[in-house]
Image (cartoon, rainbow, N blue to C red):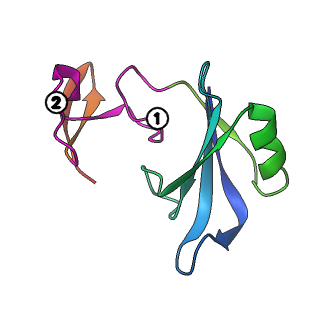
């Protein structure tokens, strides 16, 4: 299960990056990940955090997020921090082309660029 929300007030995560959106991704075996985004339109996260339990993540972000929007789990092989069905090109064949992506549209994988 994944869910995302926009921060009520963006905060500085280091000396230059403002975090404005967070996505929580609860996994069955690895706990919960919080993906942090530096732009409201960002599809890929800039930073992440790990929590043992979803409840811990929700407690940390309680009061910080305007409201949560639920998303389904990512499709197999797709990027977990992207709300769209996007994967690394060639990864399904065991020869990933890092930095190159494809998106599932109408049942077909097509080139995807940011």
Q: Quadrant of the N terminus?
A: top right
Residue for point 41% across, 36% down: 84
- In this view, the residue in front, 105 or 33, is 33
Residue for point 42% across, 50% down: 44
The dot on residue 26 is: none
- Magenta-span inclusion, residue 48: no
Apparent side of residue 51 relative to residue 33 in the rendered image (left or right): right
| Up-down relation of residue 77 to residue 88 (above or below) | above
Hey, which residue is sitting farthest bottom in the picture? 15
Residue for point 76% across, 54% down: 66
Residue at the disc numbered 2: 90
- Magenta-span inclusion, residue 81: yes
- CA gap, disc 2 to disc 1? 17 Å
- In this view, the residue in front, 19 or 105, is 19
Residue at the disc numbered 1: 80
Image position, residue 111 (x, y; %): 17, 39
| Up-down relation of residue 76 to residue 33 (above or below) | above
Disc nearer the start of the sequence (2/1):
1
Image position, residue 64 (x, y; %): 78, 58
For mark 1, give the secondary structure.
loop
Q: Quadrant of the C terminus?
A: bottom left
Image position, residue 53 (x, y; %): 75, 31
Picture quadrant where residue 50 is located: top right
Image position, residue 36 (x, y; %): 57, 54
The main secondary structure of the magenta stretch is loop
Q: Residues within 10 Å of mark 1 (few under 14, many from 20)?
A: many
Write the start and end of the magenta stretch as one range. 74-99
Apparent side of residue 74 relative to residue 85 in the rendered image (left or right): right
């Amino acid at each position: 299960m994944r869910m995302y929300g926009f921060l009520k007030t963006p905060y500085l995560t280091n000396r230059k990056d403002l975090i404005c959106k967070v996505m929580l991704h609860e996994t069955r075996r690895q706990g919960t990940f919080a993906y942090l985004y530096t732009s409201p339109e960002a599809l890929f996260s800039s930073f992440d955090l790990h929590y043992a339990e979803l409840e811990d993540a929700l407690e940390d972000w309680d009061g910080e997020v305007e409201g949560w929007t639920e998303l389904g789990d990512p499709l197999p092989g797709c990027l977990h921090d992207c709300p769209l069905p996007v994967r690394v090109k060639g990864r399904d064949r065991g020869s990933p082309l890092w930095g190159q992506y494809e998106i599932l549209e109408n049942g077909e994988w097509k080139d995807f660029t940011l």
